[in-house]
Structure formats: structure tokens, C-alpha cells
Image (spheres, rainbow, N blue to C red):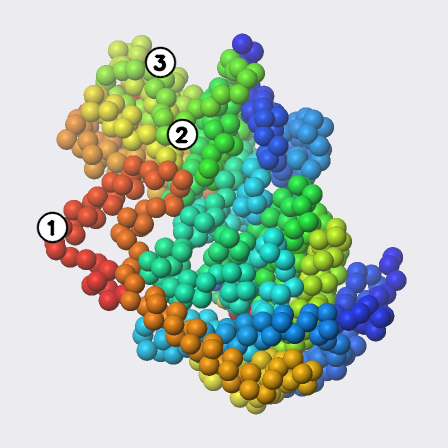
Amino acid sequence: MPVMNYIQALNSALHNEMERDPRVVVFGEDVGRAGGVFRVTDGLQSRFGEERCFDTPLCEQGIVGAAIGMALNGLKPVAEIQFMDYILPAYDQIANELATIRYRSGGQFSAPVVVRTPACGGIHGGHYHSQSTESIFTHVPGIHVVMPSDPYDAKGLLIQAIRSEDPVLFLEPKKLYRSARAEVPEEPYTIPFGQAKVLREGTDCTVVAWGVMVHVCKEAVEQAARKGIECELIDPRTLAPLDEEAILESVRKTGRLVIVHEARRNTGFGAEIAALVAEKAILHLEAPIRRVTGFDVHCPFTLDPYFLPDAPRVLLAIEETVGF
Amino acid sequence: MQAPQDRVGTGVAPGAGQTLAPGAGALQSSLRGEVVIAGGTEILRPPPVPPPVAELGPEVLRAMYRAMVLVRTLDTKMVVLQRQGRIAFYGPITGQEAATIGLAYAMRPEDWIFPALREAGVALVRGLELEAMVAQCFGNVRDIAKGRQMPCHYVHRAGNYYAMSSAIATQLPHAVGCAYASKLRREPVVSVACLGDGAVSEGDFHAAANFAGVWRVPCVFFCQNNQWAITVPYRLQSATATIAEKAVAYGFEGVRCDGNDVLAVYETARQAIEKARAGGGPTLVEALTYRILGHTTSDDPSRYRDEAEVAPWRERDPIRLFEERLREQGVLAAAEPEATAAWAKEQVEGAIRAVEGAPPPPLETLIEDVVAATPARLREQLAELRRAMARLGHDPLERSGH
Ligand SMILES: Cc1ncc(C[n+]2csc(CCOP(=O)(O)OP(=O)(O)O)c2C)c(N)n1
Ligand SMILES: [Mg+2]
């Protein structure tokens, strides 16, 4: 099986699906001729033509808005927003239009659009190239929110997203684009939404993380193991729908929970997971729930490493939770 | 650079009002027309358009007339219902029937419409049952959209009538994307993007018009310029004399027509739609009209505008103008207006009688249609509500008096 990085895995998924289904169209800023600023759509225009893979005017609300219309009328649009930081002009189209059309039309219309966007930080991008604002989307019903942490998941989940009957926000941690590598089949395959991945089993402490933080936590739980602490590391992979049972089951076993995300803490998605455990498994808890997250500030350029959780700080949170 | 162009008077029968074409000098040459001042608002009245009466034939003309009367009757009756507390809200199109019905007849069944608030007549013409429309206003179980939206937010999949969103202008990029899909499949189908004069100021208008121009998709922008956006007059909305001329900046044609003349609207919209169908790209059609009543039943226009401004527009009532023309042409018999009014009244009252007492949509529908497969967490939330209702013997819907 070939080894691919995250970009190659996504590119492979897009090739597979455009090959399989003539309704799939791929577009966004610099997506056509250049193949995307991160090269995710590389080669699609030359392979499938300018009608199916193309550059759009520089306008996020236009990109998502047009994608909605295409989906209503039988296409399977995969729209790219160049950076998640610039998705906000399209937020109204996503939250008020894309997410609502099935509900407010009483099921008469649906718009199965995939919006892909490079997300998260750790690449010295400052405020405007570092945000992970997943929780402003998980707050909205009617749209799935996906953030794969490795190339294998990225491909399977992207194909699942393209075949979904519902809109999907597909978040790609850009720090992983070239750094994460995995064996990835050339052939298409899917990974269902709402199924968490358990990366490590353990009985002492549950650690929940997604995106880049999965890699940070991998390092932390390995170090914890060397100190005799057996952590269970869970990557939900999709935040909406969330595999609640995987998290609850693990917490019932370990009695401890550390949630790690690089998004800001205040009303970050970690709060929802903490509330879930408080509502449904609080009597199993032997220590307070801990969150290791981004600061409630705007991601700073120079002091970025203080903003983002790292393995030593995650390890400390694990140790303090286990030693509580 | 393209030569200045003005389709008016060039013999393109039967004339479609004023055309603004991209290129130098286009604006001056196309703004000829009669400027009248009414209540401080400058109104550009385009040169008269010869009616294509002969082409349409008496049956179609009478159907158009009946549709206009039906829409007016529905409005009048529903406003009363709102005043009586029987429906929550209503957004009348009174005075704009020519624009909505002219557009409806200019479209083909396979075309798509992305409506704003004042296109209800198009839904009617495209086959949405009057009962379904009235039920939508009641938001009860007879509403085919399960009572999900406020009154006047119609949706009709079978008629390619997209679900009206309250959010101004958001539907415009959808129309452009829809047209892209038609173009990709080489289907001769046109998407009509409807908007008001206020919507022109929104970013989504710019996004949609720009994409449509660049992609050259079969999309027609149909703007009912009723000169008001709630309390804000057009002159505070935009510094251009017309809305149509904005098309120049997007690289396609803009046309202004008399929005109170149903045949002018029909012909202008038809030409734009057929041009788009033939691969000629988008057009921005501006139907100049006037909002005779308040913005909605929640609005009292006497607070912010002079009756003196409204009066000349009442004189140009689109139904009366059409009626006069049809009688002149011998299409409408003397007794027909009265008979039509009685017929429309019975239609509307019959529809109200048929649907008013229907129960609200069942509780289960609360969690349907969020995503394709209802997720477990929604079932759980519904179970929680049901448990609370059973424990308390309490129904929040009944309690709200809704
Ligand atoms: C994005 C957005 N902003 C504000 C409103 C509130 N609002 C509803 S209708 C309206 C005026 C619309 O004017 P126009 O586009 O001229 O349409 P008309 O009502 O005159 O047909 C406003 C401001 C809204 N619904 N959506
Ligand atoms: Mg208006």
C-alpha cells in the first residue's frame, strides 16, 4: 500500500470521486489552474476539465452560496475556502442557508455540499492563518463537522463527505498536510461519521483530542505510559455527529477525563464534551475534568507556542488528574 | 470598447423597456425616458411598450388577469386575518401584482425561481395550491413545509420554487449555482433570482452578480424596485439613478421596465430569460413599481412617508391598468372584472375554510429534516420533552396560545 501525506490522501479521494461520479465539481480560490495554495486539488483541472474543477472569484459567500445552488440542482459540489480564518464571510450562507434548507423546506430541498478548508494553527500564521473555530459550526444543526487527524482517515472521511446526503464542513489541520504520513489505499473507501477512533487503550485516564492535538496527545500518553499511567486516547474524528458512547464508555472505565483542543477554551467544543460527561457519567468521575486548550486570546504570531497546548503541558494535566 | 447601445427604439419588437449595455456612454443613452417627481422621489418612467397582446392570445391574457386578481384578493383577505389574530404575520404584495405575474408567465415550467418576499404570485402560477399557500400562513399540518417558517415563506419543490429565506439576498448566489448546474449539463433551463431594491445593497447581491457575469450562466436577476426597504427610501439605498445600470459593472445587460404594466414586465422578463436560455448570459431586470401598503403587517408606513407620494402610484394600480387595456382590446367583457372578483373571493375564502382548523404539525416533526437520518441526540431531546410534558400534564404549544 502506498504511503501518502495528508495532501496526497485528500487529492487521491478527490480523484477517485470525480472519476466515479460526474456530478462532483471542485472549486474555490486558486483551486483550478494552480491546484490550490496547498496543492490539494492538484491535477484535477487537467484531468477533469475546467467545468468540473475551476477557480472562482475571490468571494467566500459566493463560493458557498453558489455551491448550495449547484447541490439543489443535482451536482455534488466540493468547495474550498482557502483558510478557515476567511470562512466568516460565508458563515451566514453556511449557518442560515446551507444548514437550514432541508429543515425549513420541510424536507423538499437539500443541499449536500462539502466545504473543505485548511484549519488550525502551529504554522506561525498569526491570527489570520491559525484559527480552529469548529465550535461555531458544531453549534449549528444540519451540518456535519469533520476533522481528520491522519491521511488514512482524511481520505475515507472525505469520500464519505462527498457521498453524504447532508452538508459537511471538512476541516483539514494544515500543520498535518505534509507532516502526517500513513499507508493509504489508492482505491476509494469510506469511514462512517460518528465513529471515534481509539488510538490507545488504557484504564487510568481518558484523553480526548482531535486534529493536530491527536499527535500532541500521542506523545503525551506515551510519556505517561513510561511513568506507569495508562491513558486511553480517543479521536472523535467527527465532532458532529459525535460518538458520545465511545467517550462515555471510556470515562466509565477510567473515571478521569482530559480534553485537549487548540481552539480557544471559552465555549470551545471541549465544553460540550465536559457537559456530556457531567450529565451522563458524573458519578464515575474520580477527578475534575481538565481542559488543555488554546488561550482565550487572538492567536499571537510570536507567542504562538504559549497559545497552543503541547505534549509536556498535556502530560502535566494527565498526571495532575490521575494524582488528584 | 463596445459601442453605446440602447435597445429602446431599435425596433426589437415588441420592445422591452430600457436596456443598459456594458460600454462607454451606455448610461446616458439608456436613461432617456420620462422623469416624474412624486413626493420627492424621482421616478423614471420608461417609454411605452407596445403590448404583445396578439402573441399571447386572449386565454393567456385572461389567465394573467385572474392570477393578479387572485393575488390581490389573497393579500387583502390575509391582512384582515392577521389583524384578527388568526395568522401571525403577512407580507402583502399589493401594487406589485404586475411584476410578480408578469414574471411568472415569462418563465417556463422547467425554469427555477429563487423568490424574495413579493413573488407569491409566481408560486401560485407554478402550481402551488392556494390551500397550501394559506396553510403555510397558518403554519399548520396542511403546510407542505411542516410549519417551519413564518407566513409568506412559500416553498414548492414540484414548481422549482425555492424556499424563501427571511435573510435578504442570500438566495441570489443559490440561483447562480443552480444555473451553473444547468449550464454544465447543457440543459436549456434558466434560474431566476428575485430581489428587492434593498437587497441590492447586500454583499450577496454583489457576489451573485459577479459570479453570474464571470460564469455567464443562464441566470436572470429580477428586481422589484418598490422604492422602499421597510422605512428606507431608494435614494438612501443607492446613489445610482436606476438599479438596472448596476449590471454594467458586472459585465451584462440591465433593463428597466414599468413594473406596474404586466405586459411590459412579461415581455422584458421573457426576453431576458430566453436570452439566458440561448446562452446569452445573465440580465438584471428592474421592474419599477411601488409598495402601496406597509412593509408587512408589522409596519405602519404613515410614520415615515407622505400619502402624497403614494397617491400617484395608487392611480397606476396594475390591476386596473391591465383591466382597462384588456377591455380596450376586447379581451375582457364588461361584466368580467366583477365576476373575477367574486370568483377570487370564493377561492380564497374556500381555501381558508378548508385549512384554518387543521391541527399544528405533529410533535415528531420538530426533529425531522435536520439531516437525512435523524440523529440519536435529537431523539433523546424529544424523549426528554415528552417525559416532561407527561409529568407536568403540560403542552407548551397550547400554553403559548399559538
Ligand atoms: C440580511 C437581512 N437584513 C435585514 C433584514 C430585515 N429586513 C427584512 S425585509 C427588509 C427590507 C427589504 O427591502 P427590499 O429588498 O427592498 O424588499 P421589499 O421588502 O421592499 O420587497 C429588511 C431590512 C433581513 N430580513 N435580512
Ligand atoms: Mg423594496
Name which residue lies at 55% across and 87% down.
B335
Q: Which kind of residue does numbered mark 3 sit on?
A: Glu
- Mark 1 beta carbon near ligand 1 (under 8 Å): no
Look at label 2 and name its amino acid: Phe
Residue B105 image point, x, y percent: 62, 65
In this rendering, is residue A307 above or below B202?
Answer: above
Q: Which mark, residue B259?
A: none
Image marks 3 and 1: residues in contact by CB distance under 8 Å: no
What is the number of the mark on residue A193?
Answer: 2
Which residue occupies the foreground of this view, A180 or B56? B56
Q: CA distance from mark 2 to mark 1?
A: 35 Å
Q: Nearer the viewer, residue A137 or B289?
A: B289
Q: Chain of mark 3?
A: A
Disc 3 or 2, which lies upstream in sequence? Answer: 2
Asked if marks 3 and 1 fall on the same chain, the answer is: no
Q: Is residue A319 left or right of residue B279?
A: left
Q: Who is closer to the viewer here, B127 or B390? A: B127
Question: In x, y percent, where is residue B401?
Answer: 24, 67
Which of labels 3 and 1 is toward the front? 1
The residues tagged by marks 3 and 2 sit, at their Cα atoms, a distance apart of 27 Å
Residue at the image position 38 percent from the left and 64 percent from the top:
B135
Q: Which residue is mark 1?
A: B391
Q: Nearer the viewer, residue A246 or A127?
A: A246
Give residue A222's mark.
Answer: 3
Q: Residues within 10 Å of mark 1 (few under 14, many from 20)?
A: few
Q: Position of residue A157 (x, y in %)?
A: 47, 27
Three-letter amino acid code at the position of disc 1:
Arg
Quadrant for the N terminus of chain A, please: top right
Q: How many angstroms separate mark 3 from mark 1 (CA)?
A: 50 Å
Of helix, strand and loop, which one carries label 3?
Answer: helix
